[in-house]
Image (cartoon, rainbow, N blue to C red):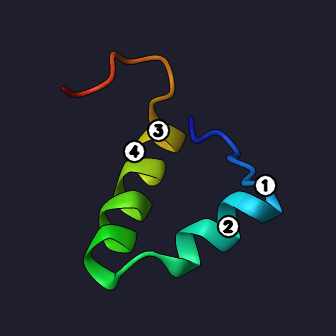
Amino acid sequence: MMYSLKIDKEAAKFIKRLDKSTRKRMKEALLEIQETPYTEAKK
């Protein structure tokens, strides 16, 4: 089951200002959270 993930306008604006590699890592992390939101965070 995939969940819906909503991102606030200000958060989206912040993400757009990140450098390309950081933005990619952020996107991958958000997609993982969307797929399995109740797992422990990676350290």
Say whether marks 3 and 4 touch (CB < 8 Å).
Answer: yes
Image quadrant holding the N terminus, namely: top right
- The amino acid sitting under disc 4 is Glu
Image quadrant holding the C terminus, namely: top left
Query: Of tags 3 and 2, which is closer to the observer?
Result: 2
- Side (left or right) of 20 relative to 27: left
Say whether marks 2 and 1 touch (CB < 8 Å).
Answer: yes
Q: CA distance from mark 3 to mark 1?
A: 16 Å
Query: Of tags 1 and 4, which is closer to the observer?
Result: 1
Residue 12 % position (x, y): 67, 67
The tag earlier along the polypeptide, 3 or 2, is 2
Say whether marks 3 and 1 touch (CB < 8 Å).
Answer: no
Q: Which mark is residue 32?
A: 4
Label 1: state its secondary structure. Answer: loop
Q: Residues within 10 Å of mark 1 (few under 14, many from 20)?
A: few
Q: Is residue 41 above or below residue 18?
A: above
Residue that carries the numbered disc 3 in the rendered image: 33
Q: Is residue 26 above or below residue 6?
A: below
- The amino acid sitting under disc 2 is Ala
Label 4: state its secondary structure. Answer: helix
Residue that carries the numbered disc 1 in the rendered image: 8
Residue that carries the numbered disc 2 in the rendered image: 12
Q: Tell me the residue at 32%/23% (across/down).
A: 41
Residue 34 % position (x, y): 53, 42
Q: CA distance from mark 2 to mark 1?
A: 6 Å
Name of the residue lying farthest toward the bottom: 20
Say whether marks 3 and 2 touch (CB < 8 Å).
Answer: no
